[in-house]
Image: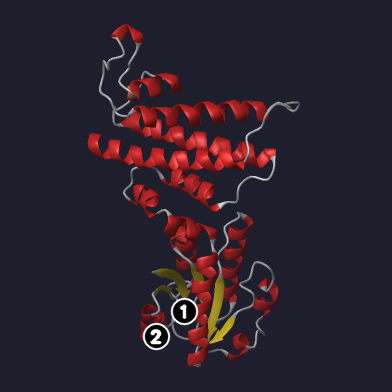
């Protein structure tokens, strides 16, 4: 199901358009005014695949009747541009019965008709063929978004966040790891490695919050050892505490921890000229982290 934020003062009485969208697997979430809709956009943009605007709608929720002008359109367009400035790309389209908007004559269309605008796509609310083209455009643009591809390709990973097992900021980190291209220089490489280690540390923090890991353990090495049952030569290699991870998961933990840590340190040295891992290793580290997330979900559910 595709989800679209819809600004239209008459969306509640335009059931036919919403019903047609549903038949195309598109759910329209309507707002009559810019103020409330922009709040939803800024707080929940990750839930939406596109934004659809009428030419004229209200600026505020308390407006009625003919209190319409294109200032509301401009406010939403500006909000979308602000998101783009934060590297949040949201395709948006106009579906209007207003003649000046269908012709692209609005000053706000001219102002925002650049790379931040959805290719100048304007659709006529009075033409069935335009509406059909609109649904196709929305789905095509959504399917090309790396974030949507990442979510659709990794549903089991993002269900972890839907269930509230880890906070939203960790979900953002994981989405960046899966959606962004592999690094092309050392600066991007360091950012990816730092991100991977940060997610791993978030897993440890969450496990500490449910007492799987004691709060008095600060060393990552000790945390990994504790999760394996504190096995040592002194205990004849037998677990002395509860075992939460098998040797394979322990190896993943250590590989991610030491590899990311070592190369983050190396990349901070301007004159490091030794062997540098390639994107093959980066891809493996990312997939190893996804396995850790699935392991974490199991342990978390068993111990809350």
Assign a secondary structure to mark 1. loop
Q: Residue at x 42, y 69 (%)?
A: 2
Residue 89, can we see it?
yes
Q: Which mark is residue 14?
A: 2
Q: Residue at x 48, y 55 (%)?
A: 150
Q: How far across and how far down the image is residue 207, in percent?
A: 34, 31
The vertical placement of 175 against 239, above or below, is below
Assign a secondary structure to mark 2. loop
Left or right for 29, reference 186: left
Q: How far across and how far down the image is residue 296, in percent?
A: 34, 37
Q: Residues within 10 Å of mark 2 (few under 14, many from 20)?
A: few
In the image shown, does 250 or 45 lie closer to the viewer?
250
Q: Residue at x 36, y 42 (%)?
A: 294
> Which residue carries the number 1 mark?
8
The vertical placement of 156 against 131, above or below, is above
In the image shown, does 137 or 56 lie closer to the viewer?
137
């Amino acid at each position: 199901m595709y989800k679209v934020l819809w600004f239209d003062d008459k969306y509640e009485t335009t059931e036919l358009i919403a019903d047609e969208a549903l038949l195309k697997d598109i759910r329209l979430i309507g707002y009559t005014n810019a103020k409330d809709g922009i709040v939803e956009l800024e707080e929940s943009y990750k839930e939406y695949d596109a934004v659809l605007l009428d030419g004229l709608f209200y600026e505020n929720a308390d407006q009625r009747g003919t209190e319409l002008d294109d200032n509301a359109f401009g406010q939403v367009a500006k909000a979308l541009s602000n998101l783009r400035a934060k590297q949040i790309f949201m395709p948006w389209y106009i579906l209007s019965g207003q003649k000046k908007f269908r012709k692209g004559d609005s000053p706000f269309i001219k102002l925002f008709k650049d790379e931040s605008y959805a290719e100048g796509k304007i659709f006529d609310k009075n033409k069935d063929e335009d509406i059909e083209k609109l649904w196709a455009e929305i789905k095509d643009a959504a399917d090309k978004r790396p974030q949507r591809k990442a979510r659709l390709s990794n549903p089991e990973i993002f269900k972890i966040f839907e269930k509230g097992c880890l906070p939203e900021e960790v979900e953002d980190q994981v989405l960046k790891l899966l959606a962004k291209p592999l690094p092309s220089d050392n600066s991007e490489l360091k950012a990816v490695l730092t991100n991977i280690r940060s997610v791993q540390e978030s897993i440890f923090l969450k496990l500490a919050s449910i007492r799987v890991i004691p709060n008095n353990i600060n060393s990552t090495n000790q945390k990994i050892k504790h999760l394996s049952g504190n096995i040592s030569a002194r205990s004849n290699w037998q677990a002395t505490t509860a075992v939460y991870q098998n040797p394979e998961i322990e190896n993943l933990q250590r590989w991610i921890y030491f590899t990311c840590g070592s190369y983050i340190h190396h990349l901070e040295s301007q004159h490091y000229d030794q062997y540098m891992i390639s994107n093959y290793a980066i891809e493996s580290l990312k997939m190893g982290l996804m396995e850790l997330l699935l392991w974490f979900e199991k342990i978390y559910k068993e111990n809350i």
